[in-house]
Every structure is written in C-alpha cells, then in structure tokens.
Image (cartoon, rainbow, N blue to C red):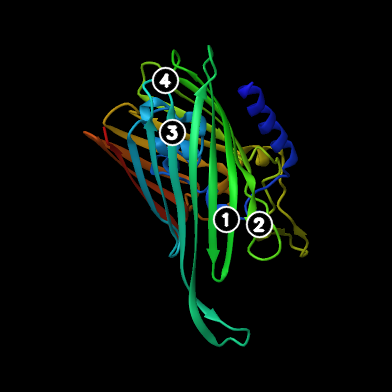
C-alpha cells in the first residue's frame, strides 16, 4: 500500500508540473552541486549508494546503513562573492535498516551597494537562502528496488524581501550488487511557496533526473551517466552571439536540432580507483559546455575534475569546475566517520 501511494504521488505531481529550467522558478540554489564528489563528476550524480550522506540530498533512495554516523561538511567558493555549502548526517536508529537523514543547504550572495531611483547611494544589503531537509528510504520487500523521500523547509531573504517554502524529493533506485550496477530516477523540488516575496507565488525548480552507474569488472573504474531536466525536452536555445552574417548583411540564427537538445541533457563522469584510499574523478556537463562555449577560443567550459583521499576516519575531497576562461570554482569537502 505504501509503495502504491508513493508512485501515485510521484506520477500525479510530475504530470501537473510544467517544464522548468533555470530562470523560470525561484529557489534555484536547490539545484546547485552539493559536494566535491558530485561536482567533479559533472555536477549531478544520483546513483552513488555507499557511505556518502551528501548523496541523499539529491537522491533520498540512496539512504542506506553504510551512512550510519557519517557527517559530511562541504563548502564552495562560488562565482563572484557568492559562497554556498552543505552539511549532512545519517543515523541508524535501530539494528536493522532504518536510517534517518538530515541535511542543510545554504547560499550566501554577499553584500551589495544600494541606490535609490535617482542613483544616490543608500545602505548596503545582502541576501541568502537555506534549506533544511529530512529524509528516509526503504527497500521494497523481496526486490532490489529502494524508494526514498526528502522533505525540505526553505527560507529565503533577498534585501528586504523574504519568502518561505516547502518541497519534496521522491526517488526510486535499483541496486544490483552482482554487477555493481545502480539505476535511479529522482523527482526533485515538488512543492510550493508558503509565503511569497511579494504578492505573486512562484514555481519551485522542479527537476526530473535519471542516472546509471557501474564499476567495471576487473578494472578500477566506475562510470556515471546522467540525464538531467527530463521534465522538458527543449533545454537548448539559439545564442544571438553566434548569428552568422553573410556578405550581403543577411543574418542567420543558430539552428538547434534534435542532437543539440539530446546532448544538453547529458552528463558523464568517471571515478578512477573508486574503492581505494585515493581516487580521481572527472566529468563533463554537455549543457554547461555548450552554453558557455566561446567562439574561436578554447575555454574548457563544462569540464570538471577532483580527487578524494581517505585518512582513517576522515575523507577529504576537492573539485575544480570550469565555466569559461574567466570563471572557475573550487569545492572542498570533509566526511567524518563518527563511529
């Protein structure tokens, strides 16, 4: 009965939501990368099923007993003066498989100079947002399927305007240990604003994500393949800076075809030596790479890389993500085994 209710809610809410990508909804910080491991693998990974409690912020079905008493702290020195981070903890509250998960995601937009309508300086102001989540997952009896959910309470303050909201993540995950194969489908940020910034209620950044990953047999490599923004097909757009002008002054806009749209849903990543004390991670985000590509200049947009080091009960992680020749970010993470 629980499983039937879960799928009914998932399918019903998904069908009611219209297509949403960046710029069309509020609380966009909810879809930022949540850890160095995830960012290094391209920005969105939903198929890790192991010790890492941060994974549950994106895929609550990944909550498992191996996360027990694991504390994860992550910080990103983002673009400009913006910074954000996450903190997660999981606890096995009985001797079987009942794991509870809690997490915090925050973003600080820094300080801004204020001006009135005449251009006269006023007081400076700031902005920030935070989401507190609680999650749980269960195995569907006698199967390799796991279902999970997160409830998120969101608070946002931008200058003098404040807003609060609530959201739900729902996920289904298939774990086939014999092949070390994981498959996941996640619906994120199903919810609403409880109180808007002004008088207009805005949509939340709903996203449907599919992922598959596997460790190769006899080769220390785990590959990851992710399809993002499956709630809408047309995520590509024509960039006016790429218009072509012929000798007669006629302008031709950039053409977006089926392959362009398909590729911009894709993210790929690999982990070298995933089970060892030191591993290397590489990723490529096709949509970011195409949208931030600079004509006639090699900018390496969309590429990300990082590494992880295990030192007894500590795991240190770092990720470097390239946006263009003038913008890149560094992400730092610490996972502590409190057992």
* Mark 2 or 3, nearer chain start: 3
Q: Is residue 329 visible?
A: yes
Q: Nearer the viewer, mark 3 or mark 4?
A: 3
Compared to residue 39, the image places residue 296 above or below, namely below
Q: Nearer the viewer, mark 1 or mark 3?
A: 3
Q: Is residue 215 left or right of residue 198?
A: left
3D distance between C-alphas at marks 2 and 3:
49 Å
Instruction: Residue 100: give its label.
Output: 3
> Helix, strand, or loop for circle 1?
loop
Q: Is residue 325 visible?
A: no
Q: Marks 2 and 1: CB-CB under 8 Å? A: yes
Q: Would you name the residue on which mark 2 appears?
A: 242
Percent position of residue 28, x then y:
57, 53
Q: Residue at x 42, y 29 (%)?
A: 99
Instruction: Residue 295: give its label.
Output: 1
Instruction: Residue 216: give its label.
Output: 4
* Mark 2 or 1, nearer chain start: 2
> Helix, strand, or loop for circle 4?
loop
* Mark 3 or 4, nearer chain start: 3
């Amino acid at each position: 009965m629980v499983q039937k209710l879960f799928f009914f809610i998932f399918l019903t809410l998904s069908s009611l939501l219209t297509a949403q990508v960046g710029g069309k909804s509020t609380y966009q910080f909810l879809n930022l990368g949540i850890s160095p491991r995830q960012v290094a693998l391209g920005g969105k990974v939903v198929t890790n099923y192991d010790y890492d409690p941060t994974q549950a912020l994106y895929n609550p079905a990944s909550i498992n007993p191996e996360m027990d008493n694991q504390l994860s702290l992550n910080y990103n020195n983002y673009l400009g003066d913006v910074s954000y981070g996450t903190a997660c903890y999981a606890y096995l509250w009985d001797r079987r498989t009942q794991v509870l998960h809690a997490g915090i995601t925050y973003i600080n937009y820094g300080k801004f100079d204020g001006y009135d309508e005449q251009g006269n300086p006023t007081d400076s102001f700031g902005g920030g947002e935070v989401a507190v989540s609680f999650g749980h997952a269960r195995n569907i009896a006698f199967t390799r399927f796991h279902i999970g959910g997160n409830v998120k309470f969101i608070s946002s303050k931008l200058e003098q305007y404040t807003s609060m909201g609530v959201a739900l993540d729902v996920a289904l995950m298939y774990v086939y240990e014999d092949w070390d194969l994981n498959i996941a489908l996640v619906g994120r940020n199903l919810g609403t604003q409880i109180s808007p910034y002004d008088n207009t209620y805005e949509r939340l950044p709903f996203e449907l994500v599919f992922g598959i990953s596997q460790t190769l047999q006899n080769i220390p490599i785990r590959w990851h393949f992710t399809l993002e923004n499956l709630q809408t097909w047309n995520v590509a757009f024509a960039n006016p800076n790429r218009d072509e002008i012929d000798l007669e002054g006629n302008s031709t806009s950039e053409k977006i075809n089926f392959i362009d749209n398909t590729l911009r849903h894709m993210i790929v990543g690999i982990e070298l030596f995933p089970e060892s004390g030191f591993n290397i991670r590489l990723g490529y985000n096709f949509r970011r790479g195409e949208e931030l590509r600079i004509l006639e200049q090699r900018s390496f947009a969309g590429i990300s890389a990082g590494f992880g080091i295990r030192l007894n009960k500590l795991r240190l992680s770092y990720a470097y993500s390239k946006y263009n020749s003038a913008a890149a970010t560094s992400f730092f993470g610490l996972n502590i085994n409190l057992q």
